[in-house]
Image (cartoon, rainbow, N blue to C red):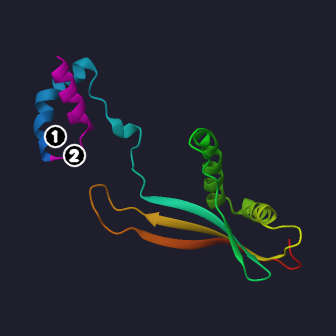
Amino acid sequence: MVVLALTIGVVWSMPDAEFKRRLLPVLQPVAVATGLEQDWRMYAPEPLGRLEFVEVRVIMANGVQRVWTPPRGDRVLGAFTWYHWQKLKENLVREPTIRVDMAHWVVRQVTELTERAARVQMVLRTELLPAPGTDGPRTVTEEILYDEILAGGQ
């Protein structure tokens, strides 16, 4: 029984392939009767097709560029704080109205009182992932979400 349950679990977790299609008719009656026919795609029906990263670039009056990225946190508490920054990143991509405030906040974070920021840019960097099971190259693109020349410094 244990071997049968493990076999069903493994077969149902496999990607669609000829081997799986041949075993399904044999295993399906037992799987349905025992509740082992879980379709794990319901938890991630469409795998991620791209990764998104937001960074804010602050160009100082002297030409030095500082780049701010959302914090990842440490190994212990990072998982708890990561979600906050992940949701902020998603909203920055979707909601143009919040970008100006975020850009100005970052300028304040990365400049000292004696420094002057001349420009701020918010950039969305996307990395297209190859289809599962392929080793194609990753395509990286950048899109400027917000760009402001700061008159008088921030």
The correct choice, above or below, for 71 with respect to 140 in the image is: above
Residue 88 image offset from top left, x and y in percent:
66, 52
Q: Is residue 12 magenta?
A: yes
Q: Quadrant for residue 75, please give it.
A: top right
State left or right for residue 130 relative to residue 72: left
Q: Tell me the crowding category of disc 2: few under 14, some 14 to 19, or many 20 or more residues within 10 angstroms, Cα based.
A: few
User: Closer to the camera, 27 or 50?
Assistant: 50
Q: Which residues are magenta?
A: 1-17
The correct choice, above or below, for 61 with respect to 107 in the image is: below
Q: Residue at x 75, y 65 (%)?
A: 103
Q: Describe the element under mark 1 as helix, strand or loop.
A: helix
User: Closer to the camera, 35 or 64?
Assistant: 64
Residue 138 image offset from top left, x and y in percent:
39, 67
**Dominant secondary structure of the magenta stretch?**
helix
Q: Is residue 61 magenta?
A: no
Disc tally is 2
Q: Tell me the crowding category of disc 1: few under 14, some 14 to 19, or many 20 or more residues within 10 angstroms, Cα based.
A: some
Cβ atoms under marks 2 and 1 closer than 8 Å: yes
User: Closer to the camera, 115 or 125?
Assistant: 115
Measure how far apart labels 2 and 1 are at the Cα level: 6 Å
Amino acid under label 2? Asp
State left or right for residue 136 relative to residue 94: left
Residue 21 image offset from top left, x and y in percent:
14, 41
Q: Residue at x 50, y 65 (%)?
A: 126
State left or right for residue 121 relative to residue 107: left
Provide the residue designation for mark 2.
Answer: 16
Provide the residue designation for mark 1.
Answer: 20
Of the 4 image quadrants, the one containing the C terminus is bottom right
